[in-house]
Image (cartoon, grey):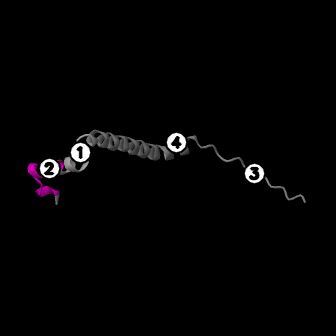
Amino acid sequence: MLANLTGWHFVIILFIILLLFGAPKLPALARSVGQSAKIFKKEIRDVTDDPAENTATAEPAAPTTRSDAA
């Protein structure tokens, strides 16, 4: 579907975005998208790193003794 888009299509799409959001709001919009992408990448890294850290540093559970002397 996107293979049929040419350079003019992208220019028109950018123009429509500029009309919708306005020139002053575009830097803030780009900044928030960049921050969101950075947070998303950090969370993905944390999720993929956690299982390796948990298995390597996990201490074995202490055996519990149960006395039925009563």
The Cα atoms of the two marked residues, 4 and 3, are separated by 25 Å
**In the displayed structure, does residue 6 sit left or right of residue 56?**
left
> Mark 1 near mark 4, Cβ–Cβ under 8 Å?
no
**The N terminus lies in quadrant:** bottom left
Give coordinates of residue 29: x percent, y percent. Answer: 30, 43
Q: Where is residue 64 in the image (x, y as percent from the top left)?
A: 75, 51
Which is closer to the viewer, label 4 or label 2? Answer: 2
Give how far across and how far down residue 67 sits, in percent: 84, 55
Work out whether mark 4 precedes mark 3 in sequence or the reverse, and give the earlier one: 4
User: Is there a contact, CB below 8 Å, between mark 2 and mark 1?
Assistant: no
Q: Which residue is drawn at 17% across and 48% down?
A: 14
- Residue extending farthest right: 70
The mark lying in front, picked from 1 and 4, is 1
Label whose residue precedes the other's in the sequence (1 or 3): 1
Pointer 1 residue: 22
- Residue at 46% x, 47% y: name it: 47
The quadrant where residue 37 appears: top left
Please name whichever residue, 25 or 31, is drawn nearer the observer in this view of the structure: 25
| Residue position marked by numbered label 4 in the rendering | 53
Q: Earlier in the sequence, mark 1 or mark 4?
A: 1
- Magenta stretch secondary structure, dominant: helix
- Judge depth for marks 1 and 3 and give the one in front: 1
Residue at which label 2 appears: 10
